[in-house]
Image (cartoon, grey):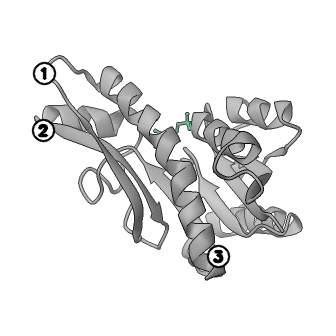
Amino acid sequence: MKTKIGVLVSGGGSNLQSIIDSCENGILKNLAEVAVVISNKADAFALERAKSHKITGIFIDRKKFADAVSYCNAIAAELKKYNIDFICLAGFLLKLEPVFIKEFSGKILNIHPALLPKFGGKGMYGHYVHEAVITAGEKESGATVHYVDEEYDHGKIIIQKKVSISNIDTPVSLAQKVLKVEHEIYQKAIKAAIEKEKK
Ligand code: GRF
């Protein structure tokens, strides 16, 4: 039986794409499948990506829920409908409530575009991360896939990969370099997490 993955997204979904591609033709082939994609943004391009691979993509509107807990419960209910084994956060910008994280403890993975524990935490997402790295004069950055626990960017690290930063790099060029590495390591981290579970 293939491991079923639910992917949570808010944006372009290039990491989602890398996971789908890996399930179809890469290291996750015969091992895993993306069973559902959930977005908190109606116009996330990630939903188009899901559709073009005949994967169910669902928009769940935060505004329709009174509070964050009921919103997370709605996401959890959808994931359960699809018998999800693992949840991959791939550019999902809303914070998941502790009740959600507890329910799926050890089953939620996130990718962060820096070398955690550096440049993580609240407010450290998207271009803010790369700007902070460049401003700090770092000589290297990279990407991290980790399990999600109740603290931002804190759970156990599964894989990290570095990229070097030259003195002509800008936050934009660094983001491109890091994104390439993200696509490479997310699938490897998923494979490692699945294999660990099967042991
Ligand atoms: C990635 O940089 C990821 O590390 C971060 O959000 C971005 C999502 O990009 N969490 P994409 O939507 O997968 O292209």
The location of residue 63, given as percent across then percent down, is 71, 49
| 146 w.r.t. 59: above or below | below
Expressed as whole percent of the image width and height from the top left, the position of residue 99 reads 61, 78
Work out how far the residue at label 2 is from the one at label 1, CA to CA, in angstroms: 12 Å
In this view, the residue in front, 25 or 70, is 25
Tag 2 and tag 1, C-beta contact below 8 Å: no
Q: Is residue 43 above or below residue 160?
A: above
With 47 as the anchor, is 156 left or right in this view?
left
Instruction: Residue at 62%, 36% (x, y): give it.
Output: 13
The tag on residue 104 is: 3
Residue 116 visible somewhere in the drawing: yes
> What residue is rendered at 84% in x and 34% in y?
51
> Whole-Å distance between the Cαs marked 3 and 2?
35 Å
User: Considering the numbered disc 2 on the image, is that residue within a helix, a strand or a loop?
Assistant: loop
Q: The disc labelled 1 sits on which kind of residue?
A: Asn
- Indicate which disc residue 167 carries: 1
